[in-house]
């Protein structure tokens, strides 16, 4: 492989790669895991962050502390395997979605918690006086107002899950369930010599998250800093 | 009354997910660390601290990976912070026209799947046919065409280099935000007093950046201790055991079915990082004016 530029362009490489590398299937899987887990995790985190932030009893402050510590906690893959087996989630797509969602909870709660304060409590009070139930208060009033931070948390989660390699490596033996990260690594293992094909595979793997990033980078970059700097 | 408006059951979803899949396995692991759990027999016996002895004293190989993990962490923390700080200062005080564009570009590698980035660098750093060495040879700098990922002595440095490239954007963005919270008045006052740029940086910028630098160091540390993808895809922990880190060793034990030893190692990490996490979160949530 020299440093010279290529002399001809072979766009059919991409088609070859899609077929041989089972990219349609792995793309669908990546999309499934990232979207499913992001939705599940941001909604659950929003619900939790909301009540924890509004009602700061000592117990709730402890629970918040407990959850946020999860950002630092590493997973124990061995015992987690046992848990996945007992819940019959191992080697399943649903299992991956739930597992990913669980790993995103601490950071999402942290991110959303800070934002809840920006919503005036008077809104809550007004709604209660008008006879609003807690659920309705959250769904109709709070949640829509949380949209910016939920979008941010969602984008960060989505991008992180899409790129993840370790969890499917441990918990998905069935190659039909593999996301793009695992598929491209496997493809590389098979087609090492055909670097042109591997490159095409890599491009296709990277493309979706690149698009999401370019579209949502304002949110991603602002969300990172609001959580991290104000601390 | 507040408990009714903000009912605790809202938290159930998040708590169940979090406890079942993150907390519970971590604590279960503590118990299993003291057993001879493996994939060959269904018996699990208590064996005391044997697993820990295996980890910490079984020849040179076992301590190598701990050294690698710490070395990786220290190096990436230092390099990423310094380079990111430099870039952030440049973007905040120097370049103004396309600052947003540069920020987007610099942050870009962060979102790319590590596996993809790793595979590309694996090719670039190939000693014989990789673009880097080919380039060096073609401009007469053949002496620089080193066996990047193949030589045990250089491999770790190569991995650190690639990871720094990939991660510096993340750190820069946070430091940039930190820089933007520094009031301009301080700099104006310093200018009036005739301070040099070095003095401005040392006495104003740096001290006011301490919170952001703390956050950044913590994030880098947490990442460094857990690093997996980049090491696995660049060298798989090799050559031999030269670039093994904690996470690759854990995977290795998992594949070999030595669950007891693997869990013990995971538990050491779990306890250590949870304790670190405890102090960090306490610091973060102590302020009466919370984020």
Image (cartoon, rainbow, N blue to C red):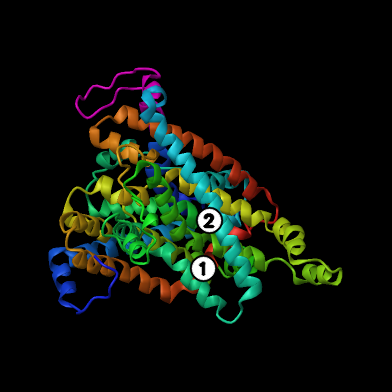
- Asked if the stretch drawn in magenta spans residue B82, the answer is no
**Residue B201, visible in the rendered structure:** yes
Find out whether the residues at labels 1 and 2 contact each other: C-beta distance under 8 Å.
no
For label 2, the SS is helix
Residue at horizontal 56 percent and vertical 61 percent from the top? B84
Q: Is residue A28 above or below residue B78?
A: below
Q: Which residue is mark 1?
A: A221
User: Of all residues shown, which one is farthest toward the right?
Assistant: B193
At horizontal 56% and vertical 60% (from top left) the residue drawn is: B83
Q: Chain of mark 2?
A: B
A103 with respect to B211 (left or right): left
Say if A213 sits above or below A67 in the image.
below
Q: Are marks 1 and 2 on the same chain?
A: no
| The image quarter in which residue A183 lies | bottom left
> Which quarter of the figure has residue B185?
bottom right
Local packing at callout 1 (Cα closer than 10 Å; few below 14, some 14-19, many 20+) is: many
Q: Nearer the viewer, residue B81 or A135?
A: B81
For the question of whether residue B4 can be seen, the reply is: no
Give whichever of A59, B98 is nearer the camera. Answer: B98
Tag shown at residue B187: none
Foreground residue, B270 or B187? B187
Which one is nearer the viewer's eye here, B118 or A50? B118
How far is the residue under mark 1 from the one under mark 2? 18 Å
SS category of the residue bearing label 1: helix
Give the quadrant of the C terminus of chain B. Answer: bottom right
Query: What span is in magenta?
Result: B28-54
Image x and y of residue B76, in percent: 50, 50
Q: Which residue is mark 2?
A: B80
């Amino acid at each position: 492989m020299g440093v010279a530029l290529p002399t001809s362009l072979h766009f059919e490489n991409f088609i070859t790669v899609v077929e041989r590398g089972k990219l349609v299937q792995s793309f669908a899987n990546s999309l499934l895991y990232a979207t499913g887990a992001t939705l599940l995790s941001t909604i659950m985190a929003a619900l939790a962050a909301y009540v924890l932030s509004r009602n700061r009893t000592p117990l709730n402050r402890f629970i918040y502390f407990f959850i946020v510590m999860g950002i630092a906690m590493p997973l124990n893959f061995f015992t987690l395997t046992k848990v996945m087996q007992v819940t019959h989630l191992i080697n399943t797509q649903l299992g991956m979605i739930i597992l990913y969602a669980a790993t995103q909870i601490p950071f999402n709660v942290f991110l959303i918690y800070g934002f809840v304060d920006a919503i005036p409590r008077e809104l809550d009070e007004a709604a209660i006086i008008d006879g609003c139930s807690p659920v309705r208060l959250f769904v109709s009033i709070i949640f829509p107002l949380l949209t910016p931070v939920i979008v941010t948390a969602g984008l960060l989660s989505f991008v992180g899950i899409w790129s993840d390699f370790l969890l499917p490596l441990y918990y998905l033996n069935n190659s039909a369930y593999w996301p793009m990260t695992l598929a491209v690594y496997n493809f590389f293992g098979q087609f090492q010599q055909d670097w042109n094909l591997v490159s095409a595979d890599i491009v296709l793997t990277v493309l979706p998250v690149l698009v999401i990033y370019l579209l949502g980078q304002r949110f991603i970059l602002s969300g990172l800093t609001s959580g991290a700097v104000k601390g | 009354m507040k408990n009714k408006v903000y009912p605790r059951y809202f938290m159930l979803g998040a708590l169940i997910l979090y406890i079942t899949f993150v907390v519970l396995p971590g604590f279960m692991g503590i118990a299993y660390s003291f057993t001879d759990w493996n994939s060959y027999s269904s018996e699990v016996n208590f064996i005391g601290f044997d697993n820990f002895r295996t980890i910490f004293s079984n020849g040179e190989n076992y301590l190598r990976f701990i050294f690698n993990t710490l070395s990786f962490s220290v190096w990436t923390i230092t390099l990423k912070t310094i380079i990111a700080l430099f870039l952030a200062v440049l973007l905040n005080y120097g370049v103004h026209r396309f600052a947003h564009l540069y920020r987007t570009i610099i942050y870009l590698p962060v979102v790319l799947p590590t596996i993809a980035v790793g595979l590309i660098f694996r090719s670039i750093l190939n000693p014989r046919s990789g673009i880097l060495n080919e380039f060096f040879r073609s401009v007469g700098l053949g002496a620089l065409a080193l066996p990047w990922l193949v030589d045990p002595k250089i491999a770790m440095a190569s991995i650190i280099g690639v990871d720094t490239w990939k991660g510096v954007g993340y750190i820069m963005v946070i430091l940039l935000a930190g820089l933007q919270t520094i009031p301009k008045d301080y700099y104006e006052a310093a200018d009036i007093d005739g301070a040099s740029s070095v003095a401005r940086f040392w006495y104003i910028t740096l001290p006011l950046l301490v919170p952001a630098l703390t956050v950044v160091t913590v994030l880098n540390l947490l990442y460094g201790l857990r690093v997996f993808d980049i090491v696995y895809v660049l060298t798989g922990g090799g050559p031999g055991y030269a670039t093994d880190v904690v996470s690759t060793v854990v995977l290795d034990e998992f594949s070999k079915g030595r669950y007891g030893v693997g869990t013990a190692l995971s538990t050491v990490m779990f306890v250590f990082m949870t304790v670190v996490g405890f102090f960090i979160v306490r610091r973060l949530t102590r302020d009466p004016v919370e984020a």
